Image (spheres, helix red, strand yellow):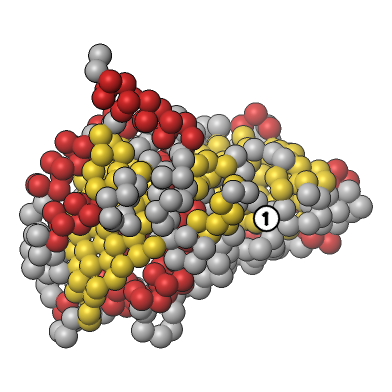
Amino acid sequence: MSNNYLFLMSFLLSLLSACNNEVVKTSERVVPSLDEPVYTASGSTPSADSINRALPASGPILHAIIAADTDDEMVGKSVEIDLENLESLLLSIQDNTGLRLQIRSISGNELTRNKVIEALNQLSVGPNDVVIFYYSGHGVNFNKGSKWPSLVLAGRFLDLDEVKARIKAKNPRFLMVFADACNNLVQVISSVRGTRGMPRAKNYRDLFLNYRGDIMASSSIPGQKSWGSHGDGGFFTQAFLNQLNEELASASIPSWQAIMERAKKPLPTYDSEQPFQDPQYEINIRRVEASLSSLEGSKQGEFEPVHVIPPSTSAVEAPFLGTFEEKPSAESLVADDEQLFIEVLPSSPFRLGDTMRLNVRNGGREKGYLLVWDINSAGEISRIFPNQFDQEHALGAGKTKTIPENAFSGFGFTIVEPVGQSVLLALLVKKHQVQMVLSERFEGLSAPTADQALQGLREQLKQKLGENGWAMNTVDYEVVD
């Protein structure tokens, strides 16, 4: 075995285990997805390669190559979140612009240098097409005079500069090349989501149809580590998507310069030796004189605004806006805790400022309608689902609902005071029972402790609903300083 081989293996092991100061990365977030998920005939969600929306067979194309190191033991979980967020963003761009989406997603054991180069070589780009290249995984800077990282692909390297050069040679109208490289994972949720309004379809069209040129970005400057979390993915990916969503919701003309300038602000880390990572970008774009929105497949006025949820800073009561007229069914759900399962993600305890998600599964044989209340340690009751932002609370037999569903749902649950033991109560009812529950103002039942408030809420729900036709379950979680 040659000395050169031993040196390379030693270098790679030190890179992957320590993510030393030669390593670079990127991250940040948030944009909503318009439509219901696309399902295959078997009912499962398809991979990015199999997504095919009903759009015109001609017109500009949005080409996307996503390279994600999801198998890596250290960064894989964070990278999976980045992959999910990017695929949701791409679908949202397609839905709002009329660009026909073609995704090549390379991850797991398929992620090799040859596979990525093959995907780059196979790109067939038209003069009005958009190309997005995104990488999430390990990166390294070899100090070759470039400020951009080299991507680590199954033990081999690919310069981000080379990726850009290969795509730019195909003359796309608009090109974005991003790398979120070297995720040093933190074991806590650490994302604080900015205030977001309702993204506008015209802003999608303005940003992705009315520009020509290229944008290149990475999550940190040479000599810095980049960070992410198991709960939210890469910090830079989160930051970028948050700023993109802010601009999509803007009432003024959106600007790529504004998005990138805000997304490059220093990001706090958990490393005392490097308390911040500093994203970097280069932008070389100009507005297209004639809007591509008038091209075939993306005509102005064909798209409705996207309805997105501003994030909640706490679990707040939100009015439900739907109406129901269904008469009671002869079949009814059973009031059995074993039928309804609820869990908090990632896991308790939570610290102030952390974000929380919920998984609720209908283990019964019939479709029901889900409601969820939060009861904090001070005994204060708040209904957190459904709300004015997410009213899709029908839950089929054997199905699981994640709340919020993903990074593009437009709202989130941020942990706030008081500290102590809190509890979530999930209720599954028949359709005709929904208004019976929503007509009550249960926050008036607040008690000195979460347990006392929970007991009061349980009794009120049982009195309102009777003995049959519903299912209920609870889960405790702890909030600490």
| Residue appearing at x 37%, y 30% in the figure | 11
| Residue appearing at x 24%, y 75% in the figure | 285
Mark 1 residue type: Gly
Q: Is residue 395 left or right of residue 161?
A: right
The N terminus, quarter of image: top left
Q: Looking at the picture, does residue 280 appear above or below residue 479? A: below
Q: Looking at the picture, does residue 381 appear above or below residue 137? A: below
Specify whether residue 135 is in view. Answer: no
| Residue appearing at x 42%, y 72% in the figure | 261
SS type, badge 1: loop
- Which is nearer the eye, 97 or 366? 97
- Which is nearer the eye, 460 or 467? 460
- Residue 324 x %, y %: 55, 60
**Most distant residue in the top direction:** 1
- Which is nearer the eye, 273 or 284? 273
Total label count? 1
- Residue 253 x %, y %: 36, 84
Q: Please rate how many residues cluster around mark 1, counting C-alpha atoms within 10 Å: few if below 14, some from 14 to 19, many from 20.
A: some
Specify whether residue 443 is in view. Answer: yes
Identify the residue under disc 1: 353
> In terms of image quadrants, where is residue 49?
top left
**Most distant residue in the right direction:** 448
Q: Looking at the picture, does residue 327 appear above or below residue 18? A: below
| Residue appearing at x 29%, y 71% in the figure | 283
Q: Looking at the picture, does residue 41 appear above or below residue 284? A: above
Q: Is residue 471 left or right of residue 235?
A: right
- Residue 168 x %, y %: 14, 61
**Most distant residue in the front direction:** 3
> In terms of image quadrants, where is residue 31?
bottom left
- Residue 4 x %, y %: 26, 24
> In terms of image quadrants, where is residue 95?
bottom left
